[in-house]
Every structure is written in structure tokens, then in C-alpha cells.
Image (spheres, helix red, strand yellow):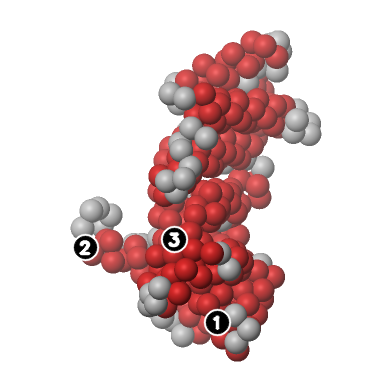
Amino acid sequence: MSGPTRRKIMVAVFTACAALVITFFLLRMMPGDIVHMIALELQQAQGVPYNEAYELAKAQLNYDPDASVFMQFLKYLAGLAQGNLGVSIVYKIPVGGIILKSLPWTMFVCSLALLCSFTAGTLLGMIAARKRGSALDHAITLYSTVTQAIPDFLIALMLLVVFAVKLRLFPIVGAYSSDTVPGFNLAFIIDALYHAVLPVTAFTLQCMGTWALQARATATSILNEDYVTVAKAKGLKERTITLHYVGRNAMLPLVTGLAISFGAMLGGSMFIEGIFNYPGIGFYVGQAIGTRDFMLIQGIFLVTTFAMIFAVLMSEFVYSLLDPRIKAGQ
């Protein structure tokens, strides 16, 4: 393993450790005595004495306020090593179970949306660069600017009202129909795709403009490069130049942005998933914030942060594979 590659991995590990520390102190920075608050809720809900409820609250949070900070941190790390992210205050089940259940749905929607928005946006950007100054270029630029300015939850709300409520073409809530048996079968896959159409469309419409503007800017600069001028002088077809000379090189700077965008989708899916009542990570974040479920917020924050760090690290190596001029270790 080369020095630069090792350095990238060390930076990723350091960032992950920083996320661990921030997550640890997140619970302790909450206003008031969180253990006392949960103990009172348990006492009222289960009718147990306060002392017993207090011990139950400490067990749920994996947090003893009377212990030293160092011992608390060791206990926190020990719990994480065993996959223990605590127990949800509202749902009364392990946070890890909620994340394992909801994360695949969010990754499913975000992956489809990222694929669609990146492909369509990059294509539109290259068309705009190729036809720069034309009416088509102005139209694509206007669309990209407008969609960037509109919040994603507003786009989701408009899609919900028009296509789900008014036209009734798509379902309003859920990831699949209640009468569909989950499993790796064609009926379930089609039903899941049908329920994901509106959330994916909301993400795609909002993100596509960003990719289009970035691809247009990159492709415009590449069109002025000497090797493109030489290719034109050789009489190569316009399509060949666009795809092989401009398209590939225009996509390279966007690769790192893919990982960042995927992480942003994971973290910012709260509003869209909340509007469609889609059972992903974002939906549970919204529920946790509304109900002050600190353990669930803490667990989701940690997992999504780790996922983004990993995605960015992988993008560094993928970029080096796509561009032979850059070695993985540089």
C-alpha cells in the first residue's frame, strides 16, 4: 500500500473517530437530564417505582450519568462493538433493528434517484454545452436554475397532490402494498418500484439540475481543449467526439460529487420520505425529532456519517480507475 493511499485511509479513519466522539457527546449535550425524563415516562407508562424506572432508563440509553466521562465512553464503545446502538425511546426496540429495516429502503430510493438524475443531468449538460448559446441551452440552464431553487419537499408535495391525490396514479403512502408478500419475487419487486416512483422522481427532479449545470461547465471547458480541436480536424463524427472525448472527461470531475450527493440524499431524505410516509431512514429521523427520541437520532446520525465517509473514500479510488492519468495512490 502506497503512502498517499494509506494517508487517505487514515483521514477516513480519523473522520470516523471524530464522528464517534461527536455522537457520544451529542446525547450529553441535550438540555435537561435525559435519564430523568425517560425515567418519568417509564414510570408513568409501566407503573414501576421511580428508582426502577431510572435504572431501566440508564440501560436503554447505555449511559450512566454518575460514571466518569472516560468510563462512559468506554461503555459506549463496548456497546458499539457489540452492535448496540441503544433502544428507541418511542418504539421500544433496538435502534440497530430500526436502521437495518429502514436503511435498505432509503438506499433503494436514493440509488435509483442518483442514477436517474446523474445520467439525465449529465446528458442535458453535455447537450447544453454542445449547443451553447442556443434556445435549447437557455432552456436547460433555466430549468436547472429553477429546480435548484425549489426545495425538494415542495417538489415532493406537488407530486403527491397531483399524481397521488388528484389523478390517483400512484399510492400515497408506504413502500409496498399491504396485500403483497415481501420477498425476492417479481410481484414484490414491481410493487416496490411502483411505490418508489414518486419519491425517486422528487429526488431526481431536484438533483438533475445540479448535475446539468456542473456537466455543462465542465464540458464547455473541455470543448476548448486542443485534443478536441484535433479530433474535429481529423473529421471525426460529432457523436464520437461528444461521447468519447467530451463525455468521458466531463464525467470525471463529477464522480467524487456522486458520493457526496449520495450521502446528502441519505441525510436529507427526511422531508421527502416524511411526505410520502416512506419507511426509510429519513422518515424515522423526522419521527425521532418530533418525539425527542434521542437514541434513534444518535444511531441514525452515526450510521449515515459512516456511510458517507465510506462512499467518499471509495469515490477516490473509483476516480483513479476511470482516469488512467491519476494513480490510486496520488
Q: Nearer the viewer, residue 249 or 273?
A: 249
User: Mark 3: which amino acid?
Assistant: Arg
Which residue reaches farthest right?
Answer: 31
Q: Is residue 50 left or right of residue 200?
A: right
User: Mark 1: which amino acid?
Assistant: Lys
What label sits on residue 74 in the rendered view? Answer: none
Q: Nearer the viewer, residue 10 or 183?
A: 10
Check disc 3 and report the residue beneath it.
Answer: 248
Q: In this rendering, is residue 146 above or below 25? A: below
Residue in the image at 61% along x and 35% along y: 298
Q: How far across and down, in percent of the image, does residue 303 sit?
A: 52, 37
Q: Earlier in the sequence, mark 2 or mark 3?
A: 2
Q: Quadrant of residue 248?
A: bottom left
Contact, mark 1 vs mark 3 (Cβ under 8 Å): no
Q: Is residue 144 left or right of residue 193?
A: right
Q: In this rendering, is residue 167 above or below 327? A: below
Residue in the image at 74% along x and 33% along y: 30
Q: Earlier in the sequence, mark 1 or mark 2?
A: 1
What label sits on residue 131 in the rendered view? Answer: 1
Q: Secondary structure at mark 2?
A: helix
Check disc 2 and report the residue beneath it.
Answer: 186
Q: How far across and down, in percent of the image, does residue 190 sit?
A: 28, 66
Residue in the image at 48% along x and 32% along y: 329
Front: mark 1 or 2 = 1
Residue count near mark 2 (Cα–Cα under 10 Å), binned few <14, some 14–19, many ≥20: few
